[in-house]
Image: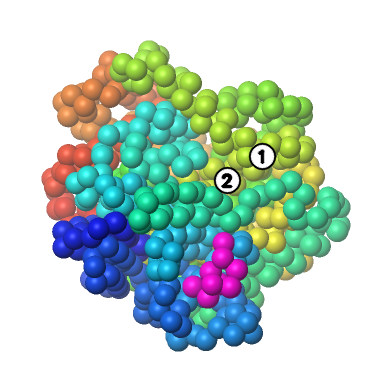
C-alpha cells in the first residue's frame, strides 16, 4: 500500500539493505505502484516510498540546497503553492516540485513550528545530517498511519505493521492493552497497536531519533486547545462562518485538475460535499454502495442526477456474499488487522480504478456537525447534560463499549487478559480524554474524543483501504472548519441544522431528497422524522424496495456467512491460540446464529483478529477456499 518505510542504524551494514528491500516488498501489492528508495553510502539510513503517482508525483527523496537535509514524504499538501511562495520569499531555492521539498525548507526556516499550520494529509521522514537525527512527522489529524519501533541500535518505521514484522528483531508479542482497547471499544486508542513493541505516530506527531545516542523523543506540532480559534459562536454568525469555511475546504479538495470521484450515500455528509461543488465547472464521478432496494443508493442516484454527475452503483448482492472471506482476508491484509470493518467497501475498490478516479472525496468527519448520528459516540440528552469528568467517563464507558462485549456471557479471554481487560481499557480511555481537560461545556469533550481518537484510529484505517487504489481527501477535516465547530454551542450541531443551512444556500434541490438516516426530507420536524423512522422499520422488515438499509451484516452472518464464521472461529487453530475462551466463543457464535443475541461486531472483531494472527504471525499462505494468495491481496481484481 502507498506509504513510507525506513531503517536508521548507528553502525549500518549490508544486511540492512536487504531488510529494507523486504520491508518495501511487503508494501508493494501491484506493478502500477511507484517505488522509490534511498540508501546512505554507509548503510546507516534506508528510506523508501510507495506511491500511486497521482499527486505529489515528483521524484524523491528531496534535498535542500546544500544536501544537508533529505526527506521522503507520502501524501500531499493542499496549500503547496502558498507555502512555496512564502518560503521562496524567505530566499529558499527550489530544485523541483516535490511536496517533500516544502517540508525541508520549512524545517530549515521554522523547525517544528512550520508544521503546525500545514494543510494536507501526509507522513514524512526528514534526515538531518548535521544533527545526525531523523524526524518523523505527520499531518494535524494523523490520517495516514505511521508505525515505529526500536531495533537494536536504531529505529524502524513503516506505514504498515507487516513491513516492520519483516525485521527479525521486531517482537511480535501481542499487547494486552491494545487487545483490550480493540475488543472493548471496537477500535484502538492513543498510540497503541495490537503488538507490544510497535506504536503509531500520534496526530501532529513529531518524533526525533538521534542516531549516535539512540535517544528517542516524541512531541506534537499542534494540539486542539481550549479557545484557540477565538470567541464562542452562535446563531446566524456561526452558520455564515461554517458555510464559508466549508466552501473553502471543498474548493481546496477539488483543485489540482485530478480526475475526481465522490463516495456518495443517502446521508448528510457526502450530500453536503456534493452540494458545495459546482459540477458544471468541476466534473466529478459519484459512486454509491448498498443492497438492492436500499434507500441509500436511491437517494444517491437522485442527487447525482440533480447535480449532473456520472454515477455508478455497486450492489451488495449474492456475488459479494459468495466472496466474503476473500474480501475479509484482503481487508485484514491492507489494514494489518487493526480495523474493525464490515468489508463492504472491499469489492468496490476495483471500480474506482476502472472509472479512472485518481482523487476520491469522502464525507468522514461530517459527524462533527451532527453528533446525534455518530455511531457509538451519538449524543443523547445525558451527554448534553454532562457536568463533570466523572459524568464524562461514565457516559463514554457506557456508550463506547455497548456494542462489543456488553452482552457476552462468561469470560471472553483466557488468563490475565480477562482479569485485566476492563482496567486496561478504562486506563486507555482516561488517557485519551485527559487531553481535553478544561474544555467547556463537558459535552464538547465527546467531540474532542471523536476527533482525536475515533477518526484517527478508525477512520484513518478506512482510508487505508481506499488509498490502495486512489488518493483520498476529507473536506470536513479542515483546520478552519474544525476550529469553528469547537467554538459553537452543542445544540447547534446535533441535528441537520448546519448541513441543511449549507444545502439551502448551495444546492436547495437536495433538501427534498430523503436523508437515508431519517427517511424523510432534510430539515423535517421531529414528528415527521419519528413517523418516517417507524415506516422505514416496518417496510424494511417487509422487504419493500426503497426502504432497505445499505447492509444487513448481522443477518448475513447468521445466514449466508455462517460457514465463514464457523470455519474461522470454531476451528482448532483459533482454539489452540489460547487467547479466547473457546466455550465463550462457541456460545457467542451459537447465540448469534439462533437469533438470541446480536453479536455482529464482536463476531467481526474476533474473525479479523484471528485472520490477522494467521497472516502476520503464522505467515499463512493458504487463503479462503477457492482463492489464491495473490487474489486475496490484489486490490485491483474485479470481484
Numbered badge on residue 452: 2
Residue 332: give x, y in percent of width and height.
31, 46
Q: How is the image coloured?
A: rainbow
Residue 315: give x, y in percent of width and height.
39, 55
Q: Nearer the viewer, residue 22 or 571?
A: 22
Residue 167: give x, y in percent of width and height.
22, 50
Is 106 colored magenta in this rendering?
Answer: yes
Q: Nearer the viewer, residue 491 or 167?
A: 167
For the point 34% across and 17% down, which residue is it?
416
Q: Residues within 10 Å of mark 1 (few under 14, many from 20)?
A: many
In the rendered image, the quadrant that contains the N terminus is: bottom left
Give the magenta part as a residue range: 104-112
Numbered badge on residue 491: none
Dominant secondary structure, magenta: helix
For the point 47% across and 53% down, which residue is it?
207
Residue 414: give x, y in percent of width and height.
30, 18
Q: Is residue 206 visible?
A: yes
Q: Which residue is mark 1?
A: 436
Is 468 colored magenta in this rendering?
Answer: no
Distance between the Cα atoms at labels 1 and 2?
10 Å
Amino acid at each position: 500500500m502507498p506509504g513510507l518505510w525506513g531503517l536508521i542504524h548507528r553502525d549500518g551494514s549490508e544486511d540492512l539493505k536487504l531488510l529494507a528491500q523486504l520491508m518495501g516488498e511487503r508494501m508493494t501489492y501491484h506493478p502500477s505502484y511507484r517505488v522509490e528508495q534511498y540508501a546512505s553510502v554507509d548503510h546507516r539510513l534506508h528510506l523508501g516510498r510507495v506511491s500511486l503517482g497521482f499527486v505529489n508525483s515528483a521524484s524523491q527523496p528531496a534535498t535542500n540546497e546544500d544536501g544537508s537535509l533529505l526527506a521522503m514524504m507520502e501524501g500531499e499538501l493542499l496549500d503547496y503553492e502558498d507555502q512555496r511562495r512564502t518560503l521562496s520569499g524567505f530566499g529558499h531555492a527550489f530544485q523541483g516540485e516535490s511536496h517533500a521539498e516544502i517540508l525541508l525548507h520549512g524545517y530549515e526556516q521554522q523547525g517544528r513550528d512550520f508544521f503546525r499550520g500545514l494543510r494536507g494529509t501526509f507522513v514524512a521522514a526528514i534526515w538531518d545530517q548535521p544533527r545526525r537525527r531523523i524526524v518523523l512527522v505527520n499531518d494535524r489529524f494523523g490520517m495516514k498511519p505511521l508505525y515505529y519501533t526500536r531495533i537494536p541500535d536504531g529505529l524502524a518505521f513503516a506505514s504498515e505493521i507487516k513491513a516492520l514484522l519483516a525485521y527479525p528483531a521486531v517482537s511480535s508479542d501481542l499487547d494486552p492493552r491494545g487487545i483490550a482497547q480493540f475488543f472493548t471499544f471496537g477500535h484502538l486508542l492513543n498510540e497503541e497497536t495490537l503488538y507490544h513493541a510497535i506504536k503509531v505516530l500520534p496526530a501532529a506527531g513529531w518524533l526525533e531519533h538521534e542516531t549516535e545516542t539512540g535517544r528517542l523523543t516524541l512531541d506534537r506540532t499542534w494540539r486542539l486547545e481550549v479557545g484557540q480559534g477565538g470567541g464562542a459562536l452562535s446563531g446566524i454568525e456561526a452558520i455564515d462562518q461554517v458555510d464559508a469555511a466549508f466552501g473553502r475546504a471543498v474548493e481546496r479538495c477539488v483543485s489540482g485538475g485530478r480526475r475526481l470521484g465522490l463516495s456518495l450515500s443517502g446521508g448528510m455528509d457526502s450530500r453536503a460535499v456534493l452540494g458545495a461543488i459546482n459540477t458544471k465547472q468541476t466534473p466529478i464521478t459519484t459512486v454509491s454502495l448498498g443492497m438492492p432496494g436500499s434507500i441509500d443508493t436511491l437517494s444517491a442516484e437522485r442527487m447525482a442526477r440533480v447535480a449532473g454527475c456520472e454515477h455508478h452503483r455497486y450492489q451488495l448482492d449474492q456475488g459479494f456474499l459468495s466472496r466474503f472471506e476473500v474480501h475479509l482476508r484482503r481487508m485484514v491484509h491492507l489494514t494489518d488487522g487493526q480495523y474493525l470493518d464490515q468489508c463492504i467497501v472491499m469489492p468496490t475498490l476495483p471500480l474506482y480504478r476502472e472509472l479512472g478516479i485518481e482523487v476520491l472525496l469522502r464525507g468522514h468527519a461530517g459527524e462533527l456537525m451532527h453528533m446525534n448520528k455518530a455511531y457509538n459516540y451519538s449524543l443523547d440528552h445525558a451527554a448534553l447534560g454532562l457536568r463533570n469528568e466523572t459524568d464524562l467517563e461514565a457516559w463514554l464507558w457506557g456508550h463506547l463499549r455497548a456494542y462489543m462485549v456488553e452482552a457476552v456471557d462468561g469470560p471472553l479471554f483466557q488468563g490475565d487478559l480477562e482479569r485485566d481487560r476492563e482496567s486496561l481499557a478504562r486506563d486507555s480511555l482516561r488517557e485519551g480524554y485527559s487531553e481535553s481537560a478544561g474544555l467547556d461545556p463537558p459535552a464538547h469533550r465527546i467531540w474532542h474524543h471523536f476527533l482525536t481518537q475515533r477518526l484517527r484510529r478508525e477512520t484513518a484505517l478506512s482510508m487505508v483501504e481506499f488509498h490502495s487504489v486512489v488518493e483520498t481527501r476529507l473536506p470536513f477535516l479542515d483546520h478552519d472548519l474544525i476550529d469553528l465547530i469547537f467554538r459553537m454551542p452543542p445544540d447547534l450541531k446535533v441535528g441537520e441544522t448546519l448541513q441543511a443551512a449549507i444545502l439551502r444556500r448551495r444546492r436547495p434541490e437536495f433538501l427534498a431528497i430523503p436523508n437515508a438516516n431519517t427517511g424523510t426530507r432534510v430539515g423535517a420536524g421531529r414528528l415527521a422524522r419519528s413517523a418516517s423512522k417507524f415506516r422505514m422499520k416496518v417496510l424494511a422488515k417487509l422487504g419493500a424496495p426503497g426502504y432497505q438499509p445499505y447492509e444487513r451484516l448481522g443477518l448475513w452472518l447468521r445466514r449466508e456467512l455462517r460457514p465463514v464464521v464457523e470455519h474461522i472461529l470454531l476451528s482448532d487453530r483459533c482454539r489452540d491460540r489460547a487467547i479466547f475462551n473457546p466455550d465463550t466463543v462457541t456460545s457467542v457464535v451459537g447465540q448469534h446464529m439462533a437469533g438470541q443475541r446480536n453479536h455482529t461486531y464482536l463476531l467481526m472483531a474476533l474473525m479479523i483478529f484471528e485472520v490477522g494472527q494467521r497472516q502476520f504471525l503464522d505467515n499463512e499462505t493458504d487463503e479462503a477456499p477457492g482463492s489464491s494468495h495473490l487474489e486475496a491481496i490484489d486490490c485491483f481484481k474485479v470481484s
